[in-house]
Amino acid sequence: MALVLSLDAALMPAFAIGGHVPQLWPLLLAFVSLYASRSAAIWAAMILGFWLDAMHPALGVGIDAPRAVVVFGPHVLACAAGAWCVLETRAWLYRRNVLTVAFSTFNCALLASLAFIAIAGIRSAYADLFPLWGGGSGAAAVGSDILDALFSALFAILPAWGLQATLTVWGFATAGPRFAGGSRVHRGND
């Protein structure tokens, strides 16, 4: 997780197009949510959200000037919403496909950004001078985040292929070999 967040902060701005930067954290969260147990996926989402909150401080009102204040919670809940979206859709998805991971990345990033903007909008309605998403309206932030989610999903195709190739290394319970029901039959004298 630390590697993905480091790559997001250091490398991904180099791939920006028109101010829209692809992100790798939705790919990792979608991948974990596709294969891990429900509780492990939600815990991974909360840990990832905690780190994202620590990386993106809000502007607080200081005595002389605005200062950076870390607000824990908005990204935690947003990442949990993104993981929940993938958890709810994984039953009807063919998981062992790179395009499925990219589709889940889009869904995860989109729902996480919508949840973040909703939480930040509620918070900024009564407490903040500056909204957590930056300048502009919430609708403009939603439109920008839809493009960011789409760009992240398109960018996720190649890393998703690498993640799928190393699926057994991750140790997920659902990532092992598949057996048909008849292949597990034990016969007494064979």
Image (tube, rainbow, N blue to C red):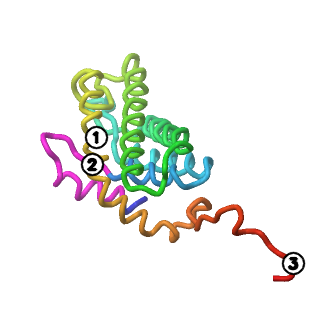
Quadrant in the rendering for residue 120: top left
Q: Where does label 1 land, which residue?
A: 150
Between residues 118 and 110, which one lies in front from this camera angle? 110
Q: Are marks 3 and 1 in contact (CB under 8 Å)?
A: no
Q: Earlier in the sequence, mark 3 or mark 2?
A: 2
Q: Quick check: 108 above or below 32?
A: above
Mark 2: which secondary structure? Answer: helix
Let me know if residue 159 appears in the view: yes
Q: Earlier in the sequence, mark 3 or mark 1?
A: 1
State the extent of the magenta-drawn residues as a range: 4-23
Q: Where does label 2 land, which residue?
A: 154
Q: Where does label 3 land, which residue?
A: 188
Please name which of the two marks, 3 or 2, marks the residue nearer to the observer.
3
- Per the image, is 1 magenta? no
Count neighbours of disc 3 (C-alpha within 10 A) and say few if under 14, some if 14 to 19, many if 20 or more. few
**CA gap, disc 3 to disc 2?**
52 Å
In the rendered image, residue 46, in percent from the top left (x then y), is placed at 52, 45
Between residues 117 and 85, which one lies in front from this camera angle? 85
Q: Which mark is residue 37?
A: none
Q: Residue type at mark 2?
A: Leu
Q: Residue type at mark 1?
A: Leu
Q: Residue furthest bottom?
A: 190
Mark 1: which secondary structure? Answer: helix
